[in-house]
């Protein structure tokens, strides 16, 4: 009784004999498997299994090849004929459908499917994933500031200092460019137009100092000194074309002289660029000068109305120097092709440069939206669309507009003339107000030319913010909208001018027109206005509320 009570009080029964014996056998087997001879036996067994697999696979392949050979030998010529006819018929259907889709929507169906559906599966995506939640708020802000959208870029369509910006200053007495913007241009000139070997040539040494001068008169004087030392100094002609020439015709003459001198120097640098690193740097500098001159000559032709000539020069330049895509010459080409209304050529350029791997711009995104809107804008009606719903083409156009607005939300107010335009700066901030001013200044006329395009933009652009209610924190197709743009734009755009123009557009229009009426009698006797009409400044017609007065110098 006592023993039974003790066992029951402990709560445990005797251990199971079967389990103990099984555990002992497992321990013995594990100890034996740890011996060297057991490991060797396992290795031999694994090797035999591998050898069997190696020998068995060729046998199966041989049997499969024999079966396939037998099957092919039984096929008749009728089968091959039917296969050829079927594949040709399917290829023809694909070709006809692709042609119909491109004619109707202005884009390739196959390319659209591959970009929209296949590339995200492969791994390429236009919108990078958001920062991990493990990062702190400070790290997120730092990474956002380092995004490429916050980088200041050279304006591809920047105006000429002497022939265009100076004319505005003569009329209003106000500087159209900020000191920060002009300082960035001076840094660009020193980077593009100078090198370490300039000390070996007196003319280039003078030009190296000229790019650092703050006064325009001092820069022009230094350019003439360089030409006295070397009549073939290309950079001296570039400076005179940009700053001394008061008309586009005069600027073109200087650039033609710069082209002649630049091509000669470029050929010499090509012959000796492999001799030393200094010669290689000189070739890089001479290449920059040549590309810059050819681009500005194409822009002169565009401003003087020789648009087809300008298009040819831009195409040749892009073909000759394909690695210099960071200069965004394709944006000049897009604007010229839109002026020619060569929309198929515009679509071809977009197909090459509106790529996931390439940086975007307002010109790329809004031109793509313009082409999509062109297909439906003429017949678009908000009332009709609300009743029957949007068609496929209208959905594509609206999505393209939403994509463009997400990239730069400042542009629509300029295109819809809810804000008055100012002269574009020489540098722009991607996705910022400065880029919007630069784009709308040149492209507003192209939107007005397509009937209903601005109406479609007016009806749909605000829908972007319903898709992205918090654009600073969350992006849809691009990075979240960078918070650094406001600060940088404040440095690029004239402070008082931009503030007054944005807040009181009608008042500023009245003020400028009154200033013109007062200043015209004095300007009529100035040297710039005594020159032929065809030689004066070019401003896109209808590009600003006050562009009528600048149009007199076309």
Image: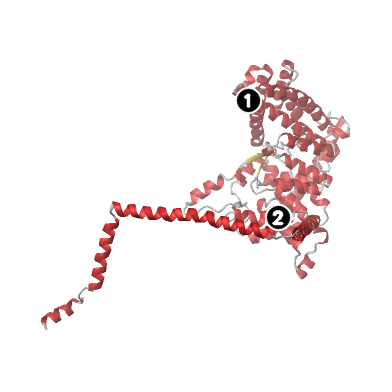
Q: Residue furthest left?
A: 2
Q: Is residue 220 at least partly visible in the picture?
A: no
Q: Nearer the viewer, residue 153 or 172?
A: 153
Mark sitting on residue 280: 1
Residue 157 picture quarter: top right
| Quarter in which the N terminus is drawn | bottom left
Residue at 29% over, 55% down: 34
Q: Nearer the viewer, residue 405 or 182?
A: 405
| Quarter in which the C terminus is drawn | top right
Mark sitting on residue 112: 2
* 55 horizontally vs 521: left or right: left
Q: Nearer the viewer, residue 40 or 111?
A: 40
Cα–Cα gap, marks 1 and 2: 42 Å
Residue at 60% over, 22% down: 276
* 533 horizontally vs 417: left or right: right
Residue 2, percent across and down? 11, 81
The image's colouring method is: secondary structure
Residue 553, percent across and down? 84, 36
Q: Of helix, strand and loop, which one carries label 2?
A: helix
Q: Is residue 293 at least partly visible in the picture?
A: yes
Determine crowd level at label 1: few under 14, some 14-19, many 20+ residues with C-alpha closer than 10 A.
some
Give the vertical position of 552 relative to 393 (above or below). above
Q: Of helix, strand and loop, which one carries label 1?
A: helix
User: Which badge, 1 or 2, comes first in the chain's sequence?
Assistant: 2
């Amino acid at each position: 009784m006592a023993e039974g009570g003790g066992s029951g009080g402990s709560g445990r029964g005797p251990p199971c004999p079967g389990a103990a014996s099984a555990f002992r056998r497992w321990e013995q087997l594990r100890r034996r498997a740890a011996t060297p001879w057991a490991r060797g036996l396992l290795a031999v067994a694994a090797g035999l299994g591998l050898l069997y697999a190696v020998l068995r696979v060729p046998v199966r392949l041989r049997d499969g090849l024999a079966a396939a050979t037998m099957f092919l030998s039984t096929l008749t010529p009728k089968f091959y004929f039917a296969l050829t006819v079927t594949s040709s018929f399917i290829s023809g259907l694909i070709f006809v459908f692709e042609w119909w889709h491109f004619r109707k929507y202005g884009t390739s169906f196959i390319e659209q499917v591959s970009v929209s559906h296949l590339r995200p599966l492969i791994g390429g995506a236009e919108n990078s994933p958001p920062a991990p939640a493990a990062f702190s708020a400070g790290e997120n802000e730092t990474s956002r500031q380092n995004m490429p959208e916050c980088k200041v870029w050279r304006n591809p369509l920047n105006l000429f200092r002497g022939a265009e910006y100076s004319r505005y200053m003569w009329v209003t007495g106000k500087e159209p460019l900020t000191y920060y913007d002009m300082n960035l241009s001076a840094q660009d000139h020193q980077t593009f137009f100078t090198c370490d070997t300039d000390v070996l040539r007196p003319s280039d040494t003078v030009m190296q100092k000229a790019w650092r001068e703050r006064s325009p008169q001092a820069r022009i004087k230094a350019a003439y000194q360089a030409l006295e030392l070397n009549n073939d100094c290309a950079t001296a002609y570039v400076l005179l074309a940009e700053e001394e020439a008061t008309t586009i015709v005069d600027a073109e003459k200087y650039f033609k002289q710069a082209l002649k001198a630049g091509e000669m120097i470029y050929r010499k640098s090509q012959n000796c660029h492999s001799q030393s690193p200094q010669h290689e740097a000189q070739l890089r500098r001479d290449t920059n000068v040549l590309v810059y001159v050819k681009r500005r000559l194409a822009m002169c032709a565009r401003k003087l109305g020789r648009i087809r000539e300008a298009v040819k020069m831009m195409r040749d330049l892009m073909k000759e120097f394909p690695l210099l895509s960071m200069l965004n010459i394709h944006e000049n080409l897009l604007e010229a092709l839109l002026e020619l209304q060569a929309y198929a050529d515009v679509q071809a350029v977009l197909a090459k440069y509106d790529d996931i791997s390439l940086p975007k711009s307002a010109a790329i995104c809004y031109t793509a939206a313009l082409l999509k809107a062109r297909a439906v804008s003429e017949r678009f009606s908000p009332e009709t669309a609300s009743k029957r719903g949007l068609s496929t083409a209208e959905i594509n156009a609206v999505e393209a507009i939403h994509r463009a607005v997400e990239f730069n939300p400042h542009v629509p107010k300029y295109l819809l003339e809810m804000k008055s335009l100012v002269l574009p700066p020489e540098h722009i901030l991607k996705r910022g107000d400065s880029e919007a001013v630069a784009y709308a200044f040149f492209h507003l006329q192209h939107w007005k030319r397509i009937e209903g395009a601005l109406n479609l933009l007016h009806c749909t652009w605000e829908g972007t913010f319903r898709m992205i209610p918090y654009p600073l924190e969350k992006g849809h197709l691009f990075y979240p909208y960078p918070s650094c743009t406001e600060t940088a734009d404040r440095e690029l755009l004239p402070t008082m001018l931009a503030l007054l123009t944005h807040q009181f557009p009608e008042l500023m229009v009245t003020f400028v027109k009154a200033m013109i009426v007062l200043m015209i009698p004095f300007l009529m006797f100035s040297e710039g206005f005594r020159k032929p009409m065809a030689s004066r400044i070019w401003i896109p017609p209808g590009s600003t509320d006050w562009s009528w007065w600048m149009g007199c110098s076309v």
